[in-house]
Amino acid sequence: MCKRGMERKAFGKELVRLGGNYDVIANSRIEINQARLLTLQAAWMMDKYGNKHSASQIAQIKVVAPNMACDVIDRAIQMHGGGGVSQDFPLAQMYSFMRCLRLADGPDEVHRRSIARLELAKLLAKD
């Protein structure tokens, strides 16, 4: 996305310097780092406490990572313009794959429900 934004010109300027493209790039980096750190936290919890006690973090990853990837890929498609959905770049295929992944292990709503139940169970256990 960054490379294409620097190479592509519109109105005599590099695309990254137009409109809110700095925000697009920054938000993409932030979201990638958030998903990465959540994944590292879940892996650490799995190593330390086992899979059963890491169920909430695992479910969170199953929601966050594919959604983040779809959002970042969509922004990259926008940055590439019409080429983003052509066969010249792998972005359309990547988006399609990530969208399918969101359904492969159950829809987001199932994972969100699991997360909510685990959070409520923690609260009830304290009382």
Image: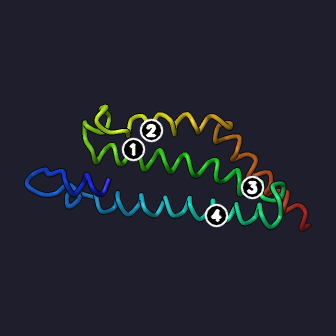
User: Along the polypeptide, which appears first: circle 3 or circle 4?
Assistant: 4
SS label for mark 2: helix
SS label for mark 4: helix
Determine the image quadrant of residue 25.
bottom left
Mark 2 packing: few (<14 Cα in 10 Å), some, or many (20+)?
many
Checking the image for residue 74, the label placed there is: 1
Checking the image for residue 40, the label placed there is: 4
Horizontal side of 98 relative to 14 (left or right) equals right
**Residue 95: image x %, image y %?**
45, 38
Q: Find the distance from the CA under tag 4 to the CA under tag 1.
A: 25 Å
Horizontal side of 8 relative to 124 (left or right) equals left
Q: Identify residue for label 3.
A: 56
Amino acid at pointer 1? Asp
**Residue 121: image x %, image y %?**
85, 57
Residue ID at (77%, 54%)? 55
Q: Identify residue for label 2.
A: 95
User: Along the polypeptide, which appears first: circle 4 or circle 1?
Assistant: 4
User: Along the polypeptide, which appears first: circle 3 or circle 1?
Assistant: 3
**Residue 117: image x %, image y %?**
79, 51
Q: Is residue 6 or residue 121 the one in the foreground? A: 6
